[in-house]
Amino acid sequence: MRTRSLTLLAETLLIGVLVCATAVFVVTALAAAAAGSVLLRELAINERTPTVRRYFALVGAAVRDPVAIAAPVVFAAVGGLDVVAVLGGLPGGQAYGLVLLVLLTGLLVTGLRAGAMWAPGEPWRLVLGSAVERTVLDWRGSVMLAVAVLAVVLVVAQAWAFVVIAPGLLVLAAVAVCGRRR
């Protein structure tokens, strides 16, 4: 039993490193989260050992839909411009900064949910629409994911070495939140 738990930990960390490596380029962040989510579900449900080959096949399947590339780019561009505006002295910037933080966290939670909900062959437009709906309707799960984001940010701020597995931890949290009602 102890050996299996260490194997499970190692497999989960491998998925985290793979997600981090492919999410470095913001363009592939959604596809990386989706591929990691599929591997985690396969690991949890079928005890299927994750492989690098399978992971990259899933990333390839995820990026075939242009929405998987466009969504993270738009999120990064809009978020980046808003942050620059707030830091640049936008009138009412402090109040707007708080609203911006809540909105960007909500979008990040929605993206995590979308990655956790995706399956090979599903169109991203429908997955993102469903993720937006689940983010609003399942507000408890959304709060859990927001707390997970905060926890990961705090851990990485204290120990930069954890940045390598941080995206995988967020994907694990998203899979857990999305699968808790099954």
Image (cartoon, rainbow, N blue to C red):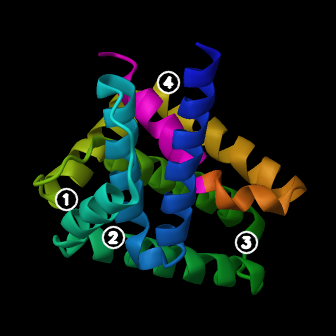
Q: In the image, what residue type sits under mark 4?
A: Arg
State how far apart marks 4 and 1 are (Cα).
Answer: 24 Å
- Which residue carries the number 3 mark? 93
- CB of mark 2 within 8 Å of CB of mark 1? yes
Q: Can you tell which of label 1 and label 3 is closer to the viewer?
A: 1
Q: In the image, what residue type sits under mark 2?
A: Ala
The earlier-in-sequence mark between 2 and 4 is 2
- Which residue carries the number 1 mark? 124
- Which residue carries the number 4 mark? 140
Magenta stretch?
A: 167-182
The earlier-in-sequence mark between 4 and 3 is 3
Q: Find numbered disc 1 in the image and state the secondary structure of the residue it sits on.
A: helix
Which residue corresponds to the image point at 19% horizontal and 59% vertical from the top-left?
124
The earlier-in-sequence mark between 1 and 3 is 3
Q: Say which of 24 and 98 sits in front.
A: 24
Q: In the image, what residue type sits under mark 1?
A: Trp
State how far apart marks 2 and 3 are (Cα).
Answer: 26 Å
Which residue corresponds to the image point at 15% horizontal and 52% vertical from the top-left?
126
Residue 44 seen in the current view: yes
Give the answer, above or below, for where 6 lies relative to 94: above
